[in-house]
Amino acid sequence: MIKWEPATATWYGSPNGAGTDGGACGYGSLPNTPYGSDVGAGSPILFMNGIGCGTCFEVKCVDGQLCSPQPVNVVITDECPGGYCSGGRTHFDLSGTAFGKMASGSANIQHLLAAGVLNVLYRRAPCIYKSQGVVFQVADGSTPFWFETVIRYLDGPGDLATVELQQFGSSAWQPMSQVWGANWCLNAGGGTPLRAPFSIRLTALQTGEKIIAHNVIPANWAPQHSYSTGVNFDTRNY
C-alpha cells in the first residue's frame, strides 16, 4: 500500500468547475470527457515538466470539522508554478469541484471553499477510465514531416517513460520526443515524409509495461482529429 504524504491544497477557477480550459498538459476542455471535473494543477514536483500529466492521486484534507475522511480522486491536468506551488512544495491547486468534494457534507462546501490553503494528505493512485482505450489527438500544425500528438486516458500509473512510432512498411521503432505537457512528436528529418498508417508503442514510467496501438493513426490522418484505440495499461500492475 502506498503511504500517505503531507501536502497543501488550494482551488482555482469556478467553484463548480474543472479548473481552467486548456492547461499546461494540452488536454483542452475537460468536462464531458473521461477526465471530468475532478482534476487539478500540480506544483513542479508533481507536474515534472509534463511527465506528471495524467497521473492520478487520492487527496484528503485533515481538518476534522470541515473535511470528510474520504479522499477525492484527482487527475493532474495543469501546472501551478508560482505562489504556494513554488519553492519545492508539494501542492495541489484543485478544481473547485474536486476541492469541494473533500467537505464533510454539502453544508460545509462553502466553508471549505472559503478556507484558503488546506493541509492535506495525498498518495498516488491508479488511473481507471472504465474500458476507455488510449486516445491520440493529432496536434494542430502537424505535417507529413512533423507528427505531433497529445496522448490521453492512460490507465494504471498514467505517466510515460517512452513513446515510439513505427511507420508503414518499417519494422523500426523511432523514439518520439516530449514537446510539452502530454504532447509528443517525431520530426521526419532528411526531407522524407513520414509514412502512415502509424503504430505507436507506449512504455509506462512506473511499471515498465509496454502496449502497442497497431495502425492507430490512419493514412488519411488530419490535425485536430482524435483516434481511439482498443488498448490500455493494466490497472492491476500498479
Image (spheres, rainbow, N blue to C red):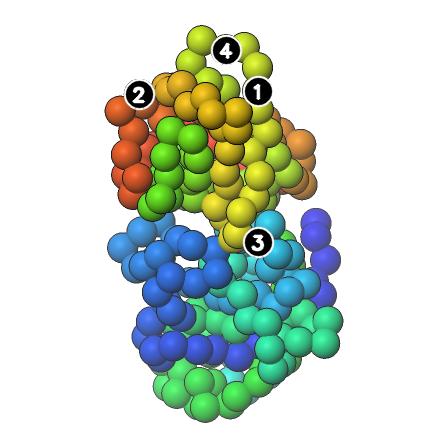
Q: Quadrant of residue 210?
A: top right
Residue at point 28%, 34% (across, down): 222
User: Which residue carries the number 2 mark?
Assistant: 219
Q: Is residue 33 left or right of residue 166?
A: left
The spot of residue 234 in percent (x, y) is: 54, 32
Q: Amino acid at mark 2?
A: Ala
CA separation in Å, label 2 and label 3:
29 Å
Please identify the quadrant where the C terminus is shown: top right
Q: Amino acid at mark 3?
A: Gly
Closer to the observer: label 3 or label 4? 4
CA separation in Å, label 1 and label 2:
18 Å
| Residue contact at pointers 3 and 4, CB within 8 angstroms | no
Residue at point 70%, 73% (across, down): 89
Front-lying residue, 213 or 6: 213
10 Å neighbourhood of mark 4: few (<14), some, or many (≥20)?
A: few
The spot of residue 44 in percent (x, y) is: 64, 65
User: Which residue carries the number 4 mark?
Assistant: 170
Tell me, yes or no, if residue 131 can be seen here.
no
Tell me, yes or no, if residue 231 can be seen here.
yes
Q: Earlier in the sequence, mark 2 or mark 3?
A: 3
Residue at point 56%, 44% (across, down): 178
10 Å neighbourhood of mark 3: few (<14), some, or many (≥20)?
A: many
* Circle 3: element type: helix
**Residue 91 against residue 193 in the figure, above or below:** below
User: Which residue carries the number 1 mark?
Assistant: 173
| Residue contact at pointers 2 and 3, CB within 8 angstroms | no
User: Which residue carries the number 3 mark?
Assistant: 50
10 Å neighbourhood of mark 1: few (<14), some, or many (≥20)?
A: some
The spot of residue 79 in percent (x, y) is: 54, 65
CA separation in Å, label 3 and label 1:
23 Å
